[in-house]
Image (cartoon, grey):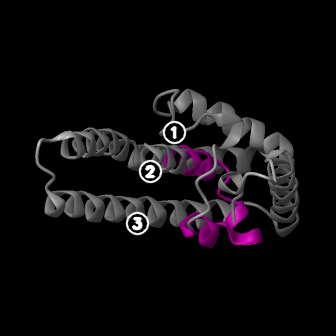
Amino acid sequence: MEETNSRRRFFRGAAIAAVLASVAAGVGATAALAAPGMHGGGWHRGGFMGGHGPMTDERIEKMVKHFAVEVNATPEQTAKLTQIAKAAGKDLRPLREKARDARKRGMELLSAPTIDRAAIERLRAEQMQAADAVSKRMSQAFADAAEVLTPDQRKKVAERMQKRHERRDHHQRPDRPEQRRG
């Protein structure tokens, strides 16, 4: 169950990251995405693969506009970021269905009368390939979006991300190791 929630958080975070992709150039978010700890709940706990359903173009536009205000983006930058985020969303949408099917297959395998370890391993390997595909597409979106913003804007994003991480870490209970990240 924890692994399913972890995957769900990963995909949710991945969608939000597409909108905030410009952070990558300033703070190395591309590397962070691939790291084991990058499975956070994402911006406002919503997201592309999360409980609110797939990201629609309307939601992507709204999120990019919100982000653009935070970094004082020009209308031209906002339009380019919207285009990048929509393209990433379009490319990642099919993975949402595949992830849902994989969770269902995993539950079937684990609840079967006989445990098929080979089938479980195949499913695990498939999910690792899917995660790699998401990571690669996100890295592309990060780089594309980073090129749209100025170095000062990327620095501003990095500072805001650092503050968010500090608030998140502060709110987690230090006496519960399972809540610690990083």
Q: Give how far apart the Cα atoms at labels 2 and 1 are.
A: 18 Å
Prevalent SS, magenta region? helix
Residue 178 vs residue 54, the one in the foreground: 178
- Residue 98 visible at all: yes
Identify the residue position indicated by label 1 in the image.
48
Q: Are marks 2 and 3 in contact (CB under 8 Å)?
A: no
Q: Residue at the location (48% across, 46% down)?
A: 2
Q: Which label sits in the foreground, 2 or 1?
A: 2
Q: Residue at the location (82% across, 57% down)?
A: 157
Identify the residue position indicated by label 2 in the image.
3
Amino acid found under the numbered disc labelled 1: Phe
Q: Secondary structure under badge 3? A: helix
Please determine whether, in this image, residue 94 is positioned above or below residue 163: above
Please give left or right for residue 24 compared with residue 165 in the image. left
Q: At which x and y percent is residue 21?
A: 64, 57
Amino acid found under the numbered disc labelled 2: Glu
> How many neighbours does mark 1 have within 10 angstroms: few (below 14), some (14-19), or many (20 or more)?
many
Identify the residue position indicated by label 3 in the image.
132
The magenta region covers: 11-35
Residue 46 vs residue 81, the one in the foreground: 46
Q: At which x and y percent is residue 11?
A: 49, 48
* Sequence-first disc among 2 and 3: 2
Q: Secondary structure under badge 1? A: loop
Q: Give how far apart the Cα atoms at labels 1 and 3 are.
A: 17 Å
- Residue 87 visible at all: no
49 falls in the magenta region:
no
Q: At which x and y percent is residue 85?
A: 56, 47
Q: Give how far apart the Cα atoms at labels 2 and 3 are.
A: 16 Å
Q: Secondary structure under badge 2? A: helix
